[in-house]
Every structure is written in C-alpha cells, then in structure tokens.
Image: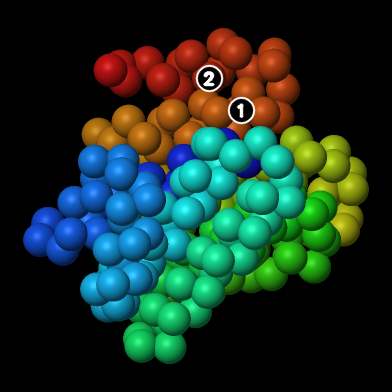
Amino acid sequence: MKALLAALLLLGASPALADAASDFRAGRWAEAIADGRREATTTSLVLAGRAQLVIAGYQVRDKAQALAMVDRADQDFDAALAKAPNDLDAQMQKAIAIGFRAKLTKGIGLAKETKRRFEAIRARRPADPLVWAALGGWHGGAIATVGGFVARTVVGARLEEVDNCFGRALQLAPEDPAFRSLYAMTLLDLDADNAARAAAVLKGVG
C-alpha cells in the first residue's frame, strides 16, 4: 500500500516550463521541493509536496522520518489550496498525503477521510483515471492491511470495488501502463495467489 500510494504521486501531467516541473520529471526530488517553494505557484507547491511524498514512499525506511515528510508535504498542499481552494490536483495530492498518514499510523479516521476526499474529487472529475485508480488502491490497501471483514465493517472497503475502480481507470486510459501496474500491485498486495491475475493485467505493458 505504501508503494502504491507513492506510485500514484508519479502519475499526471505537469507543466513543461516551470523549473519545479522539470526537476520533478527528471526525478530531482530535492530540487523540485526547493524550486517549488521558491516559485510559490499553486502548481509548483503541489509538485514540492509530491516530491516529498515520493521520497517518503521510496527512499525513507524510518516511520517517524516518513511522517515528518508527509507533514511538510501537507503544508505545501495547504499553501497551494490557500492560493486556489478549488484546484483539484492540489485536493487530490492532499488526499493521497492523508492516505499515506493513515497507512503509517493505522488511523481509521484518516482512512475514512481519504476515501471521502477521493469520492468528492471523483464526483467533480469522473473522467479522470487517476482518481479511479486511487480509489481502487484505497479499497485494496485497506483490505490488505486489516483484512476483508474489518475493512468492510470499519472503513467501508469492499473487494469488488478494487476491480470496479481499476476497471474504470483502464477504460478511461487503456494505453497508459501506469494504471495497469497499479492494478497489478494492488492485486498482489491483496493475495500473492493473484499472480496470474496480475500477469494478465500487465499483459502488453512494456
């Protein structure tokens, strides 16, 4: 689940001209953070936060350090939303950050808030494959973390929604291998015996 949340941060187009965007596309995470804050636009602040969450997801092993980075990323997303409260990209990344914190702390309330935010964004942007994939990952991650019964009864996660949400994401972006990879990752998180299904999902990716 932690890797899946981090992978979501890598998806989505970024503007071509800003220094923070160039740094982010090149994987220069520290530079993307510094440039994003220096530029201080809505988009650049979102990229600064995304870069910190990528580091937390892929490069940090200490939970306290990861949580500190999530907190700093959250501050960047809040700064972006202060400039543009209705910016859906900023709202999406803030929801992912909350989901990250929920995973690290096993916070039930945070997990519910993450779902609520994803669903609110989906209502406003129903043709965005990223939010569908995020919801599919949320349902799968909750089940993989605490088990199907607890996930269903406590936070409202449902196994059938994994396939429903990722299926919709693939309908909307059939040529994008990233969503197939996220789907396969979620299937394997749920059950190692899903290897054949994951391989089928990944067929043709490359």
**Which of the 4 image quarters holds residue 98?**
bottom right
Residue at image x 24%, y 73%? Answer: 39
Q: Which residue is mark 2?
A: 198
- Height in image: 99 above or below 82? above
Residue at image x 31%, y 20%? Answer: 205
Q: In this rendering, would 141 be left or right of 47?
A: right
Residue at image x 60%, y 13%? Answer: 195
Residue 64 appears in the rendering: yes
Secondary structure found at label 1: helix
Q: In this rendering, would 8 be left or right of 39?
A: right
**Which of the 4 image quarters holds residue 81?**
bottom left
Instruction: Locate residue 181, reporting x and y percent.
Output: 44, 29
Compare residues 163 and 79 and report the one nearer the observer: 79
Q: Which residue is mark 1?
A: 187
Compare residues 113 and 3 and report the one nearer the observer: 3
| Contact between labelled residues 2 and 1, with CB atoms less than 8 Å apart | yes
Q: Name, please, the residue furthest toward the left.
A: 17
Residue 130 appears in the rendering: no
Instruction: Locate residue 12, reporting x and y percent.
Output: 30, 52
Q: In this rendering, would 109 be left or right of 70?
A: right
What amino acid type should be assigned to the residue bearing mark 2? Ala
Answer with mark 1 or mark 2, whichever residue precedes in sequence.
1
Secondary structure found at label 2: helix
Instruction: Locate residue 70, reporting x and y percent.
Output: 59, 59
- Height in image: 50 above or below 83? above
If the image is split into quadrants, where does the C terminus sit? Answer: top left
Q: Residues within 10 Å of mark 1 (few under 14, many from 20)?
A: many
Q: Residues within 10 Å of mark 2 (few under 14, many from 20)?
A: many
Instruction: Locate residue 112, reporting x and y percent.
Output: 73, 65
What amino acid type should be assigned to the residue bearing mark 1? Leu
